[in-house]
Amino acid sequence: MADTLTLRRPDDWHVHLRDGALLQAVAPATARQFARAIVMPNLSPPITTVAAARAYRERIHAAAGAGFTPLMTAYLTDDTDPAELERGQAEGVFTACKLYPANATTNAAAGVTDLAKLERVFETLQRIGLPLLIHGEVTDAAVDVFDREEVFIERHLAPLLQRHQGLKVVLEHITTAEAADFVRAGGPRVAATITPHHLHINRNAMFRGGLRPDFYCLPVAKRERHRRALVAAATSGDPTFFLGTDSAPHPRSAKESACGCAGIYNAPFALESYAAVFEQEGALQRLEAFASEHGPRFYGLPLNEGTITLERCDQLVPQRLGEGDLSLVPFHAGELLSWRLA
Ligand code: NCD
Ligand code: ZN
């Protein structure tokens, strides 16, 4: 068994870097592992303008240091002006835009209430080739929380792709076999990101021995058969699927509360976490394509030049990172991971 694994430097195609002190605390973890990252715009208030994205990009640069490129996204609302998206792309600020159904997740209150309101936006995105990134869950309270992704695909995503046959779409953080099948069948303009946590845990993790907020995220983890389908998709070599951690830090006080926030903080050990899954599947030779090639090819960006090396070496993931208001519980807390970023 090889003791080192050298990969072209990877990118994270879905991350939450937050702002202020939390940004300072978490940005270095992402920058240590990844050359670039698609940065989610769900701040409060959300990043809806070119000016706000430019200013946020500067704050990320300051927190992450040189050698890391944040790729900015625009948060879509019912009132998004397509001209702002076009200008943001032309000025090299927006790499994509993000659709949150209103109230689907953290800071999604200003999200889209009805896709019909965005027809002009979708026409513009298609014309200028700016990818649409989607949080694919319905918010209909009558739909069971574990079915919301599948129902979103049927009710909203399939018709949207039908209406706009040239729109480039990433279904973010997929959690179901149905989503993997749908994206696989969608041709080269449809792709999906897959998180480390959805490859490792099923929904039982949230209830093992008691209520475990550290395993709660949105879309929520599903049954084991879905986890198996995601592992098969991620390790298959299919360019439709690529790395997106959805690292979503919330301070412990916000997770361990009567109404705990959704989100798993996986950035510090993300590559090690993915490597564990690929190794279990006997697919380590396909990790590089998933982590470093499929994403840039979909986005039409160059592959990174540098490399990173993972070495086989047990490391114990700490129970907590940071202090006080910034105390965070990393994914895999208290577990041994058998690869380590050199
Ligand atoms: C994300 C967050 O906290 O911003 N939470 C999560 O559970 N993934 C939002 C999101 O991506 O849904
Ligand atoms: Zn996210």
Image (cartoon, helix red, strand yellow):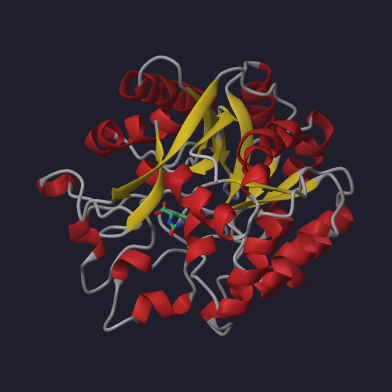
In the rendered view, tell whether residue 286 sits above or below residue 301: below
In the rendered view, tell whether residue 208 sits above or below residue 129: below
Location of residue 313 by image quarter = top left
Q: Where is residue 177 in the image (x, y as percent from the top left)?
A: 69, 71
Location of residue 293 by image quarter = top right
In the rendered view, tell whether residue 226 sits above or below residue 269: below
Q: What residue is at 45 percent from the left and 27 percent from the top?
A: 52
Q: What residue is at 70 percent from the left and 26 percent from the top?
A: 86
Location of residue 259 by image quarter = bottom left
Q: What residue is at 26 percent from the left and 83 percent from the top?
A: 210
Left or right of 12? Residue 165 is: right
Q: Can residue 79 be seen in this view?
A: no
Left or right of 339? Residue 162 is: right
Q: Position of residue 176 (x, y in %)?
A: 64, 70
Q: Nearer the viewer, residue 232 or 99?
A: 232
Q: Nearer the viewer, residue 31 or 333?
A: 333
Q: Which of 36 and 104 is in front in this view?
A: 36
Q: What residue is at 58 percent from the left and 82 percent from the top?
A: 143
Furthest residue in direction front, as rendered: 1
Left or right of 315? Residue 95 is: right
Q: Is residue 327 visible?
A: yes
Q: Where is residue 95 in the image (x, y as percent from the top left)?
A: 63, 29
